[in-house]
Image: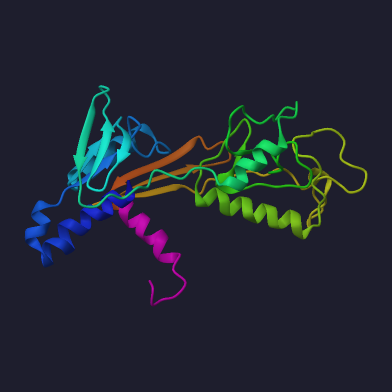
Amino acid sequence: VEFAGTLADFVRSDLAARYPVVADKAQVTLLQSQATVLTQFSAGLQGAAIGALEGAGVNVRLSVRVQEVRSDRAIIRNKEGEIEEIPFGMCVWSAGLDSRPLTERLVRQVGSPQQKFQRPRGSKKLAVDPWLRVVGADDLMALGDCSSLYGAPLPATAQVAAQQGAYAARLLNDSVRLGVGGELTSPPAAAPAPWQKKDALGGPLGPFHFLSLGLLAYVGDDRALTQFELGKSQRLRYEASGRFAFLLWKSVYVTKQVSFRNR
């Protein structure tokens, strides 16, 4: 979605300035299998995103499934169940990736232990317990896109993976023996379990908790979406769309640059 908005900006500004004849013939089309876009945002912001994309010149097609991609056209099934052909000069695929072979082998080898956090049937991700331990495996953690927190799956975003990485590093630095994932009974006698380990402040090392720092998305034509959830209960929510949200989006990514030159 964000790439479609950025590409529409390129066609409307850079391409039109240098190659106006080509720009007049260019059309950006977004194919979305779901009935909306950016599902991690609220319904109101999803509608604002569709309106902004269409305003930027993007042809948004919802509830369509790509059946085949050929050298010069995409074969899709629309929401009425009919087959269509969409010709293209360039096709960009950004619909995600399948599981890695290593992850699928681990899923099969771990099996399905009869515990509270049993791996969902047919899942291609490794189910993990609240301490990010792979269910049914001894001393094995999984984080990021290859894992799924059983019972409360988290979004597959860099924000989640970064916080999980920091949590895993803390466990490793504390030399914690993880034990078998998914077991909430007494820990092994050889070493303390994660929830019994004392941290630097003297408190118990609890399970992983994801802290949402907000959602940002660029939708083209200097417009963006912003959604922040405040408080531990995350019941307080701030939402914005349009140019003001774009300023917030830009300020966040400017501050992430490592040098003043890049900024």
Which residue extends farthest front? 71
**Residue shown at the point (59%, 33%) measured from the top left:** 152
Q: Is residue 129 visible?
A: no
**Relative to 92, 156 lies left or right:** right
x then y, percent, for residue 128? 67, 39
x then y, percent, for residue 160? 55, 48
**Residue shown at the point (10%, 58%) measured from the top left:** 22
Q: Is residue 257 magenta?
A: yes
What are the residue bounds of the magenta stretch? Answer: 245-263
Which residue extends farthest top? 80
Number of numbered callouts drawn:
0
**Relative to 50, 194 lies left or right:** right
**Residue shown at the point (27%, 33%) measured from the top left:** 76
Q: Answer above or below: position of 47 versus 172.
A: above
User: Would you identify the image quadrant in which residue 7 lies?
Assistant: bottom left
User: Would you identify the image quadrant in which residue 116 lies?
Assistant: top right
Q: Is residue 209 visible?
A: yes
Which residue extends farthest bottom? 261
**In the foreground, 225 or 54:** 54
x then y, percent, for residue 55? 18, 44
**Relative to 188, 105 lies left or right:** left
x then y, percent, for residue 34? 35, 31
**In the foreground, 105 or 192:** 105
**Residue shown at the point (83%, 45%) measured from the top left:** 193
Which residue extends farthest left? 21
**Relative to 117, 10 lies left or right:** left
